[in-house]
Amino acid sequence: MPKPHRQFRTGTRNQKLLTDNTQIPNVMALVKTEKLSKVYNPDTVPVHALRDVSITIEPGEFTSIVGPSGSGKTTLLNMIGGLDKPSSGKVFVNGTDLTGMKDSKLIDFRLRNIGFVFQHYNLIPVFTARENVSFIMLLQKRDKKEMLQRADELLEKVGLGERKDARPKEMSGGQQQRVAVARALASQPKFILADEPTANLDTTAAMNLLDIMSRMNKEQDVTFVFSTHDQRVIDRARRVISMVDGAVDSDERRDGTNGNDANSSNDNKNGNVNGNGQ
Amino acid sequence: MNTLITISWRNIWRHPARSGVMLAAVTIGLWAALLIVAWANGLLQQRMDYMIEREVTHAQVHHPEFLADIFPWHYIPEHDDLSAWLEDHPDVVSHTSRTITEGMLQSPVKTSGVRIRGIDTESETRTTRFHENMVEGEYLDTDMRNAVIISRIMADEHNMRIGNRIVLTFEDMDGELTSGSYFISGFFESASSEFDRRNIFVRSSDLLDLLADYPVYHEIGIMLEDVDLAEAVVSSLNERFEGIHAQTWRELSPELGMIVTLGDVMVVLLTLIFMIALGFGILNTMLMALFERMREIGMLLSIGMSKVRVFGMIMLESTMLTMSGALAGIFLAWLSIMRLGETGISLEMFAEGAAMIGFDYVIYPFMTTGNYITILIIVIVITMLASFYPAVKATHVNPLEAAKDS
């Protein structure tokens, strides 16, 4: 059996992080943003990439953030993933405020809490599929035997059990992206952020990938948050947050409830868009 | 750490051609640099050995004023006691006594100022290798009466041949000028044309016949078991005997001491120059590798690889790349130096010019273990310095690079 995640095991680390600079506005929310804004070039030609975005994502969601190019969906995803810092507002992941966190702590936080799937797969080209998947567990200092076992299991789950010794250049785009999903799952994150995961895939590969992610979501309750403008992904999402000009335009749940429509935008700006199916 | 080493090593071979060129540059460059250093070492060592074995010896004893004023009456007191002491000393391999004076050499062509060195052929041959400088005719162990050997250069200047007579004029012990006829038995050729123009050799017994009524010796040349024993033996001599001045080869010939220092400095300087040049190559290669992998490094930082590990990965990459080439270069150089150390490197075409400045034209290159260690340290330090900037730059890569569209 895989060793439990360190953070699950003790909680000490979280407690330390929490004592630094955090509040816990909603202990149930997996991700919560509060009036998140991002302005590029504030002193010259300000570009408002995000405007007071407040959303909440609960565990087990399969959410797409959609919108045209420049709408801020990727910026929002980067904020949630702790890859970028907001100009104002806050991001809470599992109750931990990421906005004031130092780079080194953020890196460690990402390692232990967030899985990433990138548009360009971004596998380590000199590693095999198995090494790519186990690498992140190595960074977590897991037991080597357990690490390799889990890597094999995950590759089996994404349908690449036979290709575990292949290097990225020996695999198709779809296969590489499946390895990337396995890698994201390997660290046992709280949720997985996928930035345009199907953008470079043909229909078959894209559908295959979506099947896998959807299965993971349903069977193992893995939370996925996508940024995408791929209709194939949008069609499969159970919640769609639509963004326009850096603000949330609508928040729709496919299970019949409405996360929030537009403004909603006012509510949005007031931090009430939480996708709880109000 | 193992994974970092694995990833770094595989990263190196991501572009086999580029890494191969870099490796070849380091290997061939270091090989060439080491050969030059070894050749220079050999050149300097040869010069030192030559001077010590054929002229200076490990230590010498004189009258305290002799070297400043070369007069016959500045001879070594208690010579026999001193000679017996040296005979019994365990560190002394051999010693020879010389009678030396300044004089004039007259030939039918011209007159030259010379230093007349009276030697005992038997002990001189045991102590120095000066006899190996003979290029024509016979050494002073000939039966010829009042034999003298002069350099070929001087023979040419005076238009003299073997068997010709010359007249030597010098002051005797009483300060009176005295002259004697000597017959040329052979020509020598040392490594220094300057030495050749200034020195002639006769048997000390032949010189003493005209110089003094009793044996006087102005110089004792001493060869020891090891050059490093010179200080101790000289110190003992100066303490034990009064009225003499014993000196080590380094004191007698400061330029030889400089040669040793110069050799060490040259190793460091040549390697530094080469490695600094190479350092820019390493810097360039690593920066290229970094710029090509911005997205990948961004991804590593995104998924949780610490900056320390990213730094270590880049440092390891450049270190492994350079050290692989360096070790190959050092190994190749070691093999070459081993071989050339036996056969020597002949620069016969420069023989004449080399002789003018006191060098032989066959050089036996060598490197000491210390040289290799110094070079390795320089290689490691320069590699670290050259890798530092790309490694630091890698830690500053924005994780967002991973999400960039192109």
Image (tube, coloured by chain):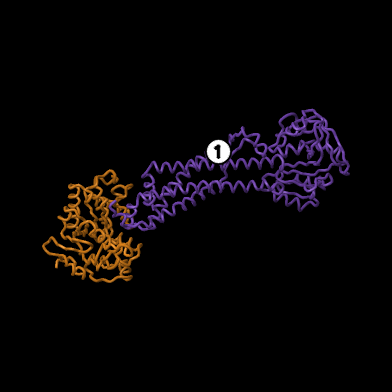
| Colour chain A appears in | orange
Describe residue B224's horizontal placement relative to residue A57 as left or right: right
Name which quarter of the figure residue B93 lies in: top right
- Going by the numbered disc 1, the residue's amino acid type is Met
Residue placed under numbered mark 1 in the picture: B338
Name which quarter of the figure residue B183 lies in: top right
Name which residue lies at 28% across and 71% down.
A23
Q: Is residue A146 visible?
A: no
Rendered location of residue B244, percent (x, y): 79, 50
Describe residue A230's horizontal placement relative to residue B192 as left or right: left
Name which residue lies at 58% across and 37% down.
B341
Chain to which mark 1 belongs? B
| Colour chain B appears in | purple
Position above or below: A246 against B188: below
Name which residue lies at 50% across and 43% down.
B30
Q: Residues within 10 Å of mark 1 (few under 14, many from 20)?
A: some
Rendered location of residue B383, percent (x, y): 47, 50
Rendered location of residue A113, percent (x, y): 28, 61
Describe residue A175's horizontal placement relative to residue B385 as left or right: left
Rendered location of residue B8, percent (x, y): 38, 49
Question: In the image shown, does B268 or B50 lie closer to the viewer?
Answer: B268
Question: In the image shown, does B15 or A50 lie closer to the viewer?
Answer: A50
Question: In the image shown, does A269 or B297 lie closer to the viewer?
Answer: A269
